[in-house]
Amino acid sequence: MNRTHLLAVIATSLLASTAQADIYKCMDDSGHTTYTNGKPEAGQKNCALMTKDQPVSTAAPQKKASATPTPASFPKVDGDTQKSRDNDRRKILETELATETKALAAAKKELAEQEATRLGDEKNYQKFIDRVQPYKDKVALHERNIDALNKEIAKLK
């Protein structure tokens, strides 16, 4: 490597290390923020040159929780009233659970009857499956309802 070539490489690396782009923060009329390294156009308003030590972030700042989470005029329920409401809710859910359990038993019985019966036009097994499928769906629906009701009852205090 000759001396001239070495000086050119050193000069290029020095210039590259000192060259930095200016960052501009621009806000439009609707409040959207844009960061750019190009100089703002003459008609563009609300643009400011950011200093090199400012962090560039596109995330909105988090809002702090208010000191009073509920307003003072918010209606409050006393403990006895809330317990009464919870007891009523539990009774309603248990009644619905008993109803769904009975409906599930009836749906399983209907399904068993349909599966035991083969009609004359069902020589093709797919016809049998198509006829029995609504009964299977009904059983699955009642099972999902029972699971949901049990979860709701478990959430109660």
Image: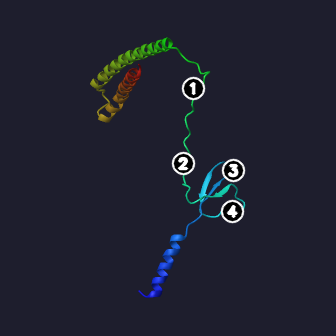
The image position of residue 26, as x and y in percent, is 64, 55
The amino acid pointed to by label 1 is: Thr
Instruction: Give how far apart the Cα atoms at labels 2 and 1 are.
Output: 28 Å
Instruction: Mark 3 or mark 1: name the one nearer the start of the chain.
Output: 3
Label 4, secondary structure: give it: loop
Q: Residues within 10 Å of mark 2 (few under 14, many from 20)?
A: few
- Disc 3 or disc 2, which is closer to the eye? 2
- Quadrant of the rendering where the N terminus is positioned: bottom left
Q: Residue at left 59%, top 61%?
A: 23
Instruction: Give how far apart the Cα atoms at labels 4 and 2 are.
Output: 25 Å
- CB within 8 Å, label 1 to label 4: no
Instruction: Mark 1 or mark 4: name the one nearer the start of the chain.
Output: 4
Q: Residue at left 58%, top 19%?
A: 75
The image position of residue 6, as x and y in percent, is 45, 83
Residue hosting label 2? 59
Side of 157 relative to 19 (left or right): left
Residue hosting label 4? 41
Farthest residue, direction left: 116
Residue hosting label 1? 70
Residue hosting label 3? 29
- Number of numbered tags placed on the structure image: 4
Instruction: Give how far apart the Cα atoms at labels 3 and 2 are.
Output: 19 Å
Q: Nearer the viewer, residue 32 or 18?
A: 18
| Residue 92 seen in the current view | yes
